[in-house]
Every structure is written in C-alpha cells, then in structure tokens.
Image (cartoon, grey):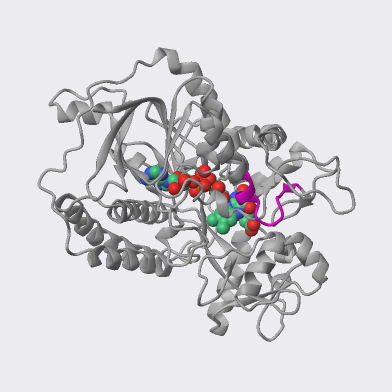
Amino acid sequence: MARQTDFLVIGSGVAGMWFALRAADHGRVTMITKAEPQESNSRYAQGGIAAVWSDEDNFDNHVQDTLTAGAGLCRRDAVEQTVREGPARVRDLIDVGTRFTRRLDDPDVYDLHREGGHSHRRILHAEDFTGQEIVRALHEACVEHDNITLLDHHMAVDLVTARWLARRRGQIPPEDDVVIGAYVLDQRGGPGSVQTYVARCTVLATGGAGKVYQFTTNPKIATGDGIAMAWRAGARIANMEFVQFHPTCLYHDKEHSFLVSEALRGEGGRLLLPNGHRFMPDIDERAELAPRDIVARAIDEQLKRHGLDCALLDMTHLSKAEVEHKFPNIHARLLTLGIDMTTGPIPVVPAAHYMCGGVQTTLQGESSIRNLFVVGEASCTGLHGANRLASNSLLEAVVFAQHAAEQCVARLSDVPMPEGLPEWDSGTAVDSDERVVIKQTWKEIRAFMWNYVGIVRTHRRLQRALRRIRLVKDEVNTYYWDFQMTGDLVELRNLVNVADMIIKCSLKRRESRGLHCTMDFPKTDPRFVADTVIQRWL
Ligand code: FAD
Ligand code: SIN
C-alpha cells in the first residue's frame, strides 16, 4: 500500500528542514533522509550565512558582490529576492534557536566575518561550525513538531510522474507532466526493500554532488541524487559545468574532506609556497580575498608548475587567544592531526565544494515539472550564476525553501491526493555477489572527473571523459536492473547521471566564464551569456 502525505520532503539539510517547518502548520509532512537525520552538507558549513546586517553595509552592495561573482549569469530577480529577504530569514533562524556568535568586545552585537568576494563584513557565524549549530536548532524544532514525520535511512530512488505512469499503463502520456510521489528504499529493510510514497507536493532538498570528484569537502551523502532523479523524470537542468572548487581543503593523509574555512583568509590568512613566497598578490589585487575560483585556480597552477602536493595557509599573525576565539573547532581538529595553526602553516589543496548548477526553478522553487519543488544546493535558482559568492548558499536554502513552502501551502487544497500508484516491481533482480563492481566503478568515475573535468579543462579531456562515462553508464544500467537495489548502487547510478550532465554542459560552453575554465576557449564570450540547459527528452 502506498503511503500518503501532503508534503513529501526528500532530504533533511537546512533547505529540507526549513521547508518542513514552514509547511507543517498546514499539512502533514513526511521528511525522508538517506543517512542520520543531521548528516548533510549543511552540517559541515563553517564560515556562515551572508546577510546585510550592519549599518556600514546595504542591499546594493550585497547584490553587486553576488552579481560580480556570478560573472554575468545571475538572474537579477533571484539575487534581489535572496539579498533583500536575507536579514528576515536570519532573524527567523535566531528565533528558531540558532545561536550566532557575538562580538567579544560587545556581546549585544553579532560578530560579522568577511570572506572572498564580499566588499563588506556580512557573514553571521556560530564560531567556525555554523552549519552544525543551524542544523541542531532546526532538527530540534522539526522533532518537536507533531505534523512532521522524519524517517532516516530512507533513500529516494526515483520520482513518479503522471507521464511515467501513463506510459506504464499503455495510455497516452499527458502534455503537462506532474510529480505524484517517489519510490523510497528503506535501507534498514535490506536490499530491494522499496516503498511507495504519494504526495500532493514533492520537494527535492537532496543537496550537492561533491562526491563525483576524487577530492571534495563534501560528506558521503553528496551524490547528486535529487538532480539525477529530476533529470530522469524529465525536468530542466541547468549550468552543471559550474562546479565550485574550494581553494583550501586540508591536505592530510588521514583526513581527506576537512574544510579550512575561507573565513581564515578573511582574517588575514596568507597563502604561501613552501619557500615562503606569497603568490596571490602577483595574481589578483584582492590577493587571498579574490573570489574563490581565482584563488583555487591560482593554487592549482602553483602546484602543477612547482610539482607540489599542497600550498600553505599561514595564520601565525593571529595570537593564540584570537585563534581560539575565532576558530576554536578548526584549531582543535587540526591539533588532533598534529597541526598547530598558531605556530605553523596549514597544508591546503583545492577540492570540489559546491554545485552551482542543478534543477532549474522559478523564484518559488518550482521545477519545470508541476508539483516538483527543488530547494537548496540541488536547485539552480539563478542566484549563483557562473560562480557562487561565499556563504550565499545557506541563505539561498532558507529564502527559497520559504517561498516554496508558501507556494505549496497556497496550492494544497487544489491538489487531490494522487491514487493508484503501483508498488515497486523488482522483476527478476537477484542479490549481487559482485559488489566490487560498484566500488571499482565509483572510484573510476571520481578519478576521471578529477583529472579530465576538474579545475582547468580542455575540450580533448572532456571528450575523453564523455567516452568513459558512456561505457560506465551502460555497465551500471545493466547492473542496476539485474541486481537487487542497495543504497550504494542507487548512489552510483545517480553519480553516473550527474557526471554525464557535468561533462555535457562543459562541452556546450565554448568559453571560460566564472567556474568553467577551459584552455581551448580561454576568454569570456558575450555569445554565451545564457544558462546551459539540458533535458532528458530534448
Ligand atoms: P544538504 O545540507 O546537503 O542536505 C541534503 C540532504 O538530503 C541530506 O540530509 C542527505 O542525506 C539527503 N539526501 C540526499 N540524497 C537523498 C536521497 N536519495 N534520499 C533521501 N535523502 C537524501 N555554505 C554557506 O552558505 N556557508 C558556509 O559556511 C558553507 N560552508 C560549507 C562547508 C562545507 C564543508 C561544505 C561541504 C559546504 C559548505 N557550504 C556553505 C555549502 C552549504 O553547506 C550547502 O550548499 C547547503 O548547506 C546545502 O543545503 P541543502 O539543504 O540543500 O543540502
Ligand atoms: C567556508 O567557510 O570557507 C565555506 C563558505 C562557503 O562555502 O560558502
């Protein structure tokens, strides 16, 4: 029997939980999440959330900084909406219980950090583990709400649409497609334990896709599931070539995904080569505070030119007391790894960090398929354009989740509960005795994406990646239908779709702009001032 709910929210990061809290006073919310309830990219956010907060700043400044970073591809209305609603959403977060850090010299005032690309101090933060604090507060509020059911270790596998259903029944598919639910793998139920959910409104809040690359700041959950599901359902996907690489991920043999926040450079951190040379002023007048695409490319170039494993981030200009006040968690974590940032430099490398592309949405977060809303990192709202300004994504998550919730609530009484969804049919699939295939393929994709579709690209390398992903796609598809479904197989299938989309969008953009840098077309070309849109059925 299909399980019914008014709002099906897939993902429990900041975007999913914000949507759930805003919708729950108006209907039943079922929020499913594939790992532990608080595990998400959101949880690892360090620097903070950007909002105009001080008298020295104003909306125009924040709008302009966002547009400049976005390199000509931001949607101005999305930027205006996000920036202007920023302070109100931050106040909401405080009301829900988020404890942002206050100034040492004036505890009545919130402390504001500055990060690359920001002309003013406007980053509210909770020490240096902002995400953990916001997620804690939102999770507590969700658990307390009677109308929210949170199901962990439940992984959405595929969306169910009216068109798909009609085809399956041998009927003529409707012109205007609509999402009516999803198939969900209960990971505690063993391989092949798939349940059916129907909903009046379905929300993808599944986050980013950093795991498509060998080196990333993202946790294990970031496999682009929502973007891949929406793609398979036929939604419009945009700008997948714009993958943001964070300049400073810790370089350490025991810790591969630990971010060293941009806020450190905001507090005067200097990037050095092992010989002590500070290279950023040679490259950009904003030096270490240039937008992160410029800094990441600069580090990448230095590493390649000098054959180095890592660059160094020096924070020794700060006193021990300052470090302990501003960056207590990063400092403590580094100490456990034998690095004392108060006395010596931190080894850093660039790593995949954020997906600027995703499922294309309206300002209300609706995708090109009716009743499918997409919020947070899985969406492409037009805010980030070709490059995201630091700390704008937590803000985007709450602003757009708020709009999406308002839109869904307003529509609720007009949408009947869908009926007649068939149960999942696993056909002749059997248990796999070759799980090694999944592990090997996963590794292969991540390696060629890093080497061929990384920070600096060429047309030839992209073509090479395209040939490989075609082969892998065939293999994974065969494997997917032959064997019982498991979580890692579902993720691998999604990773393949996402890698394919990144490669295809990269090949379409025959210029360098924002995060997409190709040696064959090194200049920005005005003929390409448009989103790269792809859709399965086109
Ligand atoms: P997430 O927080 O990633 O949540 C996704 C959720 O979906 C998770 O619960 C996941 O388990 C679930 N999920 C995924 N697939 C499925 C599926 N198939 N079925 C069910 N559930 C699923 N941004 C800032 O603005 N400021 C910062 O300081 C900052 N620092 C960052 C530091 C790090 C290390 C990282 C990785 C990112 C940082 N970002 C920062 C980016 C920001 O954290 C994310 O973009 C944002 O939190 C994304 O929120 P989200 O709710 O869209 O996705
Ligand atoms: C950081 O703290 O450097 C990450 C900020 C962001 O990704 O927005």
Q: Residue at x 54, y 21 (%)?
A: 25
Q: Quadrant of residue 134?
A: top right
Q: Outermost residue toward the bottom?
A: 275
Apparent side of residue 117 relative to residue 193 in the rendered image (left or right): right
Q: Residue at x 32, y 30 (%)?
A: 181
Give the mark count: 0
Q: Quadrant of residue 251?
A: bottom right
Image coordinates for residue 165, horizontal then vertical, percent:
21, 28
Instruction: Please tell me whether residue 274 is drawn above or below residue 296 in the rendered image.
Output: below
Instruction: Please tell me whether residue 141 is drawn above or below residue 320 in the rendered image.
Output: above
Q: Outermost residue toward the left?
A: 428
Q: Outermost residue toward the right?
A: 105
Query: Magenta residues, as a range?
Result: 122-134
Q: Is residue 454 visible?
A: yes
Query: Is residue 169 on the magenta stretch?
Result: no
Query: Is residue 131 on the magenta stretch?
Result: yes
Of residue 518 and residue 171, the one placed in the foreground of this image is 171
Of residue 318 and residue 447, the one placed in the foreground of this image is 318
Q: Is residue 529 visible?
A: no
Q: Residue at x 18, y 56 (%)?
A: 479
Which corner quadrant holds the N terminus? top left
Q: Outermost residue toward the top?
A: 414
Image coordinates for residue 464, horizontal then vertical, percent:
32, 66
Image coordinates for residue 270, horizontal then vertical, percent:
73, 71
Apparent side of residue 537 relative to residue 24 in the rendered image (left or right): left
Which corner quadrant holds the C terminus? top left
